[in-house]
């Protein structure tokens, strides 16, 4: 007879909560809770299962707390969790519980966003009865072709790990698998454990060791010596190298290693959206944004580069300007990435490793090698020229400001004022519309964690819940949420959650009566800004070209409990920013409502983005746009040449 293992009788829901409260992550000897808490919205699918477990946990208090936060929309709560994880360099996140059916499917967009951006979040959608005794139940899909399919199967392609716990015995492997993926820098993304509503409430005798504290060490894989040697040989042979710094620089905490590498070698740095702030903007090698929304400085250097050193980047089309950014016929790529999947892109030499470790090893292998003075001089000259354009955009000349309608500002002025009056450590948050591109070009980042633009999924509605996540992660910093009227209208609701939790976010709500971004894009592609303005349907034309809609977004924000400042001049904007900064740290959300002119653009990137134009059309505008499109298309490059050592 073997001794019976000690067990504890809990429901599946209670076991999930107790397990999550005992998980820790660790990197560089620092340990933190893996889960800050659980966000949720209850319905009949989770109220008596996971919900009961969370109640019991809250009432018990003590060490094993898993704080519960009620959100307003399930998509939004996933954004909050993901933004938190990003601000915490992927070392901590939240669990999200949702009811069956629509509550769970509302999380799908958040799941995709997490996976695209490689950010960890644990999703606990509820499922319809595993027993199916009285089905179909409320909100059950009832697929005629497969009896075991539920709406939660839609999470499979969006998750890096998926399991459905139909029996309590399956829970331990599901939980351990989920933790493994959440804390693996290569695999991480949305992790989904679907919990049928009856299973959540089912009791089981669990081995107590399931609930022992567990520490998940987040790895820093080391580069192989041969890869570093080859990369160093390529860098020595290059005359015009450039670094493209991606989000991996931040997640690895490789900023200092990157700075040391660039100072030693004189190699300039262009930054992706996720990588922005990898070098402080004032650093001589910092050329700012690269690609479709890049600076002319970084883009000129990218265009000439014979070697691109990608660090922690997945080379999205915005970064490569849809494969037109790198025009040197001899250009080759060295890609430092923890994921082999990304390291192999553009036929580059793969250095599969943690960014910090690889940059440190590479700097040592280069042993004092540096680019020539001409390359450094060119960086300085290109940067001076670009910086002057930024200055002019922030402070437009009288001929621009005089032409603006009363009380209306340019978007660049708004961004410039916020940038100037925010503290260096304050975080700017944005995701969709015209502001991400403008922030990428114009924003001067002064601290490694101060720039947070979600541009992997560029999801309208991310801004406010994302801002809440950042503030929860870093309550010592003010958070400036830059949101357009379109994005705001998609998801203003989490302002209520910010009120409830007394979370201070400063929302700058930029009203331009529609889609500045897609409007300009539409115009440039010959589609005449069709369907991008918020206007009445005009009875005479039958089209959406009537009067402006009489919507009052400031009143809307006020009605949700925010403190609101409406500004009509630059001076009022500056005062409102100061007032917002001075507002109490636990006073909830502050909204600054400002109107901007959508026809005035930030300085041009002198770059391109591939958006296909109709090949045949009745419209002159579309035909002309197609001619321009064909000309750009001809500059697209395959980047397929093998990257080999040049000295053998
Ligand atoms: C959920 C979602 N739907 C659609 C889009 C496509 N899209 C990108 S920007 C944009 C308009 C954003 O409008 P607004 O927030 O007012 O910003 P503006 O373009 O005026 O700067 C749209 C519809 C998107 N990114 N996300
Ligand atoms: Mg707008």
Image (cartoon, rainbow, N blue to C red):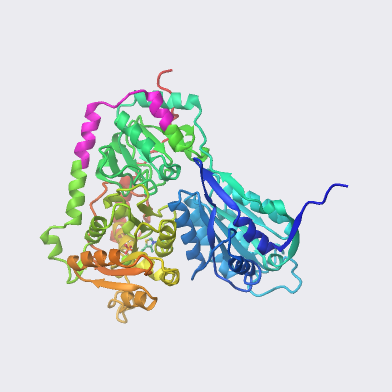
Residue closer to the observer: 394 or 540: 394
Task: Indicate the position of residue 412 as horizontal and vertical percent values.
Answer: 23, 58
Considering only vertical position in the picture, is 616 above or below 487?
above
- Asked if residue 348 shows in the view, the reply is no
Quadrant location of the C terminus in the rendered image? top left
Quadrant in the rendering for residue 239: top left
Question: Which residues, given as a range, are shown in magenta?
Answer: 360-383
Farthest residue, direction bottom = 539
Comparing 54 with 50, the one in front is 54
Q: Is residue 416 magenta?
A: no
323, 625: nearer the viewer: 323
Q: Is residue 367 magenta?
A: yes
Left or right: 95 in relation to 83 = right
**The quarter of the displayed image where residue 422 is located:** bottom left
Q: Quadrant of residue 563?
A: bottom left
Q: Residue 2: x and y, percent?
A: 85, 47
Q: Which is nearer the eye, 145 or 285?
A: 285
Residue furthest right in the image: 1
* Residue 176 visible in the shown view: yes
Location of residue 54 in the rendering, given as x and y in whole percent from the top left corner: 60, 66
- The residue at the point 29 percent across, 77 percent down is 546
Q: Examine the residues drawn in magenta and state their main secondary structure.
A: helix
């Amino acid at each position: 007879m073997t001794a019976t293992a000690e067990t504890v009788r809990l429901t599946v829901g209670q076991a999930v909560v107790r397990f999550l409260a005992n998980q820790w992550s660790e990197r560089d000897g620092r340990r933190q809770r893996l889960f800050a808490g659980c966000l949720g919205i209850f319905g009949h699918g989770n109220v008596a299962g996971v919900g009961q477990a969370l109640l019991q946990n809250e009432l018990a208090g003590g060490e094993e707390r898993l704080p519960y936060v009620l959100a307003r929309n399930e998509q939004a709560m996933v954004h909050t969790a993901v933004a938190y994880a990003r601000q915490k360099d992927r070392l901590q996140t939240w669990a999200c519980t949702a009811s069956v059916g629509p509550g769970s499917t509302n999380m799908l967009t958040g799941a995709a966003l997490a996976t695209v951006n490689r950010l960890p979040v644990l999703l606990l959608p509820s499922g319809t009865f595993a027993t199916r005794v009285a089905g179909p139940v409320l909100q059950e899909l009832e697929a005629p072709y497969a009896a075991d399919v539920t709406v939660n199967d839609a999470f499979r392609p969006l998750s890096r790990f998926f399991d459905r716990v139909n029996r309590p015995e399956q829970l331990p492997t599901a939980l351990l698998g989920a933790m493994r993926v959440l804390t693996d820098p290569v695999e991480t993304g949305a992790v989904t454990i679907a919990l049928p509503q009856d299973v959540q409430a089912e009791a089981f005798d669990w081995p107590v060791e399931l609930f022992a504290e567990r520490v998940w060490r987040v790895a820093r894989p080391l580069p192989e010596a041969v890869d570093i040697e080859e990369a160093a040989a390529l860098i020595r042979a290059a005359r015009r190298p450039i670094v493209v710094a991606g989000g991996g620089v931040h997640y690895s905490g490789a900023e200092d290693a990157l700075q040391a590498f660039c100072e030693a070698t004189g190699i300039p740095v262009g930054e992706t959206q996720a990588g922005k702030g990898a070098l402080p903007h004032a650093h001589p090698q910092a050329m700012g944004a690269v690609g479709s929304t890049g600076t002319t400085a970084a883009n000129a250097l990218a265009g000439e580069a014979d070697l691109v050193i990608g660090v922690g980047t997945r080379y999205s089309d915005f970064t490569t300007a849809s494969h037109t950014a790198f025009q040197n016929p001899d250009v080759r790529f060295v890609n430092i990435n923890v994921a082999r999947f990304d390291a192999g892109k553009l036929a580059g030499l793969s250095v599969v490793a943690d960014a910090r470790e690889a940059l440190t090893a590479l700097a040592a292998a280069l042993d004092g090698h540096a680019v020539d003075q001409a390359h450094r001089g060119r960086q300085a000259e290109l940067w001076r020229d670009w910086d002057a354009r930024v200055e002019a955009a922030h402070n437009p000349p009288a001929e621009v400001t005089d032409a603006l309608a009363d009380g209306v500002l340019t978007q660049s002025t708004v961004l410039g004022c916020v940038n100037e009056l925010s503290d260096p450590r304050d975080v700017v948050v944005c995701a969709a519309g015209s502001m991400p591109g403008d922030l990428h070009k114009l924003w001067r980042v002064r601290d490694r964690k101060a720039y947070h633009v979600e541009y992997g999924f560029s999801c309208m509605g991310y801004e406010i819940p994302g801002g809440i996540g950042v503030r929860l992660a870093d309550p010592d910093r003010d958070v400036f949420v830059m949101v357009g009227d379109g994005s705001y209208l998609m998801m203003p609701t989490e302002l209520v959650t910010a009120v409830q939790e007394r979370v201070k976010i400063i929302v700058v709500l930029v009203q331009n009566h529609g889609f500045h971004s897609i409007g300009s894009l539409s115009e440039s592609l010959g589609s005449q800004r069709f369907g991008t303005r918020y206007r009445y349907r005009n009875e005479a034309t039958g089209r959406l070209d009537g009067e402006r809609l009489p919507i009052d977004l400031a009143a809307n924000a006020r009605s949700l409990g925010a403190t609101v400042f409406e500004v009509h001049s630059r001076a009022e904007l500056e005062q409102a920013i100061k007032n917002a900064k001075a507002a109490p740290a636990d006073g909830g959300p502050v909204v600054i409502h400002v109107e901007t002119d959508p026809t005035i653009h930030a300085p041009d990137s002198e770059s391109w983005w591939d958006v296909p134009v109709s090949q045949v059309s009745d419209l002159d505008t579309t035909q002309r746009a197609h001619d321009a499109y064909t000309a750009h298309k001809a500059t697209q490059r395959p980047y397929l040449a093998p990257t080999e050592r040049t000295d053998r």
